[in-house]
Image (tube, grey):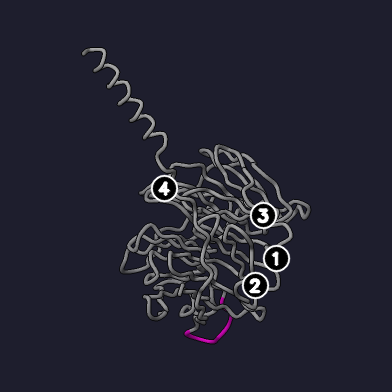
């Protein structure tokens, strides 16, 4: 009897182990759809002077912010409530360039004149002005992060035009300038997974052969990962970090770049905005908006100019575009 019980127990254990090992794997990523209905929204409350829309962020399709510098303050900050666009009037002078939110009630905006603004769900207010000693101002380029852990990057500029790349960090109570090495580059983008490596891209205008750089930030140390003759584009897709450069897309993990998509021979020129590696948008040749669905890269809309930035939701997209005559608009795509 004891032997029979032991045999049954062993068989039961094998059954359990086999069942665990043969459990169905996580479903594969599905190709992204392309059946969008497109509309163009020109965000202008005043037609006077220039407008440079440069950043978009939203918590949902009915809560989207677009920012950028303009000749008149009524054209600098816009909000979409799911039905219409409204211009938001800041109570102080600002030159917005990039925006990133944690939630509907915590949104951050950086400017090209050293200022960092915060939205609390009701009102935009200047949170701080930060300038390194010996420099005239910070021209911020990008901001990204999580609650109590945000980074903003750009350049610190002196009165005589000399400059250095600069990185500032928010720890939940204040913004501080990191004591990183002086590098004569424009730090253009910052991106990271929560608790993951902080990646920063830079542009070296003094080196036309390899102008783009990709760095990893660790504390106050910057380590160079890659140089490129093309631009470097950072994106989080399906909770994984990706880098687009040299007409290819790489997954970044454990200090390594692993090639996952080769777009050589397609119209792809840059950009990487999307949901997964089988569903992302790009800036393509001849002013086209491109889309990759895991199989091919195709042109799905002629934007008539440059594609600046994008916010992607499950059922729609908001894309800032600049026509070749420098008129900006928001391209809004809804899935059928």
User: Disc 1 designates what residue?
Assistant: 267
Question: SS for tag 1?
Answer: loop
In the figure, 166 relative to 57: above or below? Answer: above
Check if residue 233 falls in the magenta segment.
no
Main SS of the magenta part reads loop
Image: magenta residue range:
45-51
Pointer 3: what residue?
Answer: 203
Q: Is residue 49 magenta?
A: yes
**Residue 288 numbered tag:** 2
Instruction: State the residue at coordinates (49%, 75%).
Output: 332
Q: Closer to the observer: label 2 or label 4?
A: 2
Q: CA distance from mark 1 to mark 2?
A: 9 Å
- Name which of mark 3 and mark 1 comes first in the sequence: 3
Depicted 299 relative to depicted 18: above or below: below
Q: Secondary structure at mark 2?
A: strand
Residue 202 appears in the figure = no
């Amino acid at each position: 009897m004891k032997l029979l019980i032991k045999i049954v127990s062993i068989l039961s254990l094998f059954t359990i182990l086999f069942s665990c090992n043969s459990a169905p794997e996580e479903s594969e990523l599905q190709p992204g759809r392309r059946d969008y209905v497109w509309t163009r929204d020109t965000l202008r409350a005043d037609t006077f002077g220039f407008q440079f829309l440069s950043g978009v962020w939203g918590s949902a399709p009915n809560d989207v912010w677009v920012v950028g510098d303009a000749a008149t303050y009524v054209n600098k900050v816009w909000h979409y409530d799911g039905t219409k666009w409204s211009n938001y009037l800041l109570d102080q002078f600002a030159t917005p360039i990039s925006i990133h939110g944690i939630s509907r009630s915590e949104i951050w905006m950086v400017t090209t004149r050293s200022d960092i603004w915060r939205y609390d769900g009701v009102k935009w207010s200047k949170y701080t002005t930060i300038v390194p000693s010996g420099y005239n101002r910070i021209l911020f380029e990008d901001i990204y992060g999580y609650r109590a852990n945000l980074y903003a990057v750009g350049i610190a500029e002196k009165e005589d035009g000399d400059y250095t790349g600069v990185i500032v960090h928010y720890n939940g109570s204040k913004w501080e300038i990191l004591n990183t090495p002086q590098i004569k580059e424009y730090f253009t983008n910052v991106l990271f997974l929560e608790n993951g490596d902080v990646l920063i891209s830079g542009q070296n205008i003094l080196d036309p052969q390899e102008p783009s750089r990709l760095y990893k930030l660790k504390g106050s140390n910057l380590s160079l990962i890659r140089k490129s003759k093309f631009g470097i584009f950072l994106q989080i897709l399906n909770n994984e970090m990706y880098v687009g450069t040299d007409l290819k897309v790489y997954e970044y993990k454990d200090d390594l770049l692993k090639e996952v998509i080769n777009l050589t021979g397609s119209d792809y020129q840059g950009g990487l905005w999307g949901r997964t590696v089988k569903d992302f948008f790009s800036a393509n040749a001849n002013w086209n908006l491109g889309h990759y669905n895991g199989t091919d890269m195709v042109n799905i809309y002629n934007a008539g100019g440059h594609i600046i930035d994008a916010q992607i939701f499950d059922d729609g997209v908001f894309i800032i575009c600049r026509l070749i005559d420098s008129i900006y608009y928001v391209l809004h795509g809804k899935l059928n």
